Image: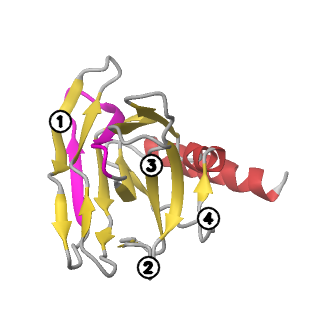
C-alpha cells in the first residue's frame, strides 16, 4: 500500500468512526493545512484532498467561464491570513466579472456545518471584499437552517476573521453548502467543521 493510499485509508476510517460514534455529536475540522500550497494547489488535487473527508466540490459561474477552486497560503503581500495557518480554500473566477458560486457536497449528512472567513489584510491601498452568502440544503435540495453571509467590505485596515455556523433542525440534515459571491473577488474559507 502506497503512503498516499494509506493516508487516505486512515482518514476515511477516522471519518467513519466519527460518524458512527454514537448519539453524541462528532465533528471533524478541515483546515486545508496538510498540503504545501505555497505556490497554490488547483483543481483535481484540491478535490482529492476534500474527498478524504467525504466532501466533493462543484464550482459554477453565471457565464461560460469555469471558476477555479484552489488551496492557497496566506502571508505578507497575500491580502489574508488563515485562521489556522497557513492555508485557505479559495474559488476564483476564470476571466469573467460575473457572480460565481461553489457547492460543497457531504457524503455523510450533517447536523451542522461551520467555517471561518479568513482575516483580511490590506496592502498599500484599501481593499474590497465581496458581498457573499452561504446556504445549506438537504438531500431533497430544500434550504436547511439560517443562511449566513456578509455585505461588501471596504477597508484600509485589517478586518478580523469571522466564524459562521449553519445548524439543521432536529428532523433534518445538511447534505450541501453553497457559497455565492458577487463579481468582485473570492471568499476565503478556512477551518470547515463538519458535525454529525
Q: Are marks 1 and 4 in contact (CB under 8 Å)?
A: no
Name the secondary structure under disc 2. loop
Where does residue 193 sit, x and y in percent of width and height?
Answer: 36, 54
- Residue under the point 84% across and 54% down: 2
Q: Please tell me which of labels 2 and 4 falls first in the chain.
A: 4
Where does residue 70 sit, x and y in percent of width and height?
Answer: 53, 53
In the figure, residue 40 lies in which quadrant? bottom right
Q: Please tell me which of labels 1 and 2 falls first in the chain.
A: 2
Task: Count neighbours of disc 4 (C-alpha within 10 A) and say few if under 14, some if 14 to 19, many if 20 or more.
Answer: some
Instruction: Determine which residue is flagged by label 3.
Output: 91
* Residue 169 colored in magenta in the image: yes
Q: Outermost residue toward the right?
A: 1
Instruction: Determine which residue is flagged by label 1.
Output: 145
- Residue under the point 31% across and 20% down: 141
Task: Count neighbours of disc 3 (C-alpha within 10 A) and say few if under 14, some if 14 to 19, many if 20 or more.
Answer: many
Q: Please tell me which of labels 1 and 4 falls first in the chain.
A: 4
Instruction: Determine which residue is flagged by label 2.
Output: 77
Q: Please tell me which of labels 3 and 1 falls first in the chain.
A: 3
In the image, 21 versus 59, the foreground residue is 59
Quadrant containing the C terminus is top left
Compared to 5, does 173 lie above or below?
Answer: above
Of badges 1 and 2, nearer the viewer stands 2
Query: Left of 25 or right of it: where is 160?
Result: left
Name the secondary structure under disc 4. loop
Q: Which residues are magenta?
A: 162-184
* Residue 42 colored in magenta in the image: no
Dominant SS in magenta: strand
In the image, 88 versus 30, the foreground residue is 88
Where does residue 18 sit, x and y in percent of width and height?
Answer: 46, 48
Q: Please tell me which of labels 4 and 3 falls first in the chain.
A: 4
Amino acid at each position: 500500500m502506497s503512503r498516499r493510499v494509506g493516508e487516505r485509508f486512515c482518514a476515511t476510517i477516522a471519518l467513519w468512526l466519527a460518524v458512527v460514534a454514537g448519539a453524541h455529536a462528532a465533528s471533524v475540522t478541515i483546515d486545508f493545512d496538510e498540503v504545501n500550497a505555497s505556490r497554490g494547489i488547483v483543481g483535481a488535487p484540491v478535490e482529492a484532498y476534500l474527498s478524504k473527508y467525504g466532501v466533493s466540490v462543484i464550482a459554477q459561474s453565471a457565464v461560460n467561464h469555469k471558476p477555479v477552486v484552489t488551496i492557497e497560503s496566506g502571508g505578507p503581500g497575500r491580502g489574508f491570513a488563515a485562521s489556522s495557518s497557513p492555508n485557505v480554500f479559495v474559488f476564483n473566477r476564470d476571466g469573467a466579472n460575473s457572480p460565481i458560486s461553489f457547492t460543497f457536497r457531504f457524503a455523510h449528512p450533517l447536523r451542522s456545518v461551520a467555517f471561518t472567513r479568513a482575516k483580511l489584510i490590506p496592502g498599500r491601498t484599501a481593499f474590497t471584499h465581496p458581498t457573499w452568502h452561504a446556504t445549506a440544503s438537504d438531500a431533497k435540495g430544500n434550504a436547511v437552517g439560517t443562511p449566513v453571509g456578509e455585505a461588501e467590505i471596504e477597508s484600509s485596515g485589517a478586518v478580523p476573521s469571522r466564524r459562521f455556523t449553519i445548524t439543521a433542525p432536529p428532523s433534518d440534515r445538511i447534505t450541501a453548502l453553497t457559497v455565492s459571491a458577487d463579481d468582485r473577488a473570492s471568499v476565503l474559507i478556512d477551518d470547515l467543521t463538519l458535525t454529525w
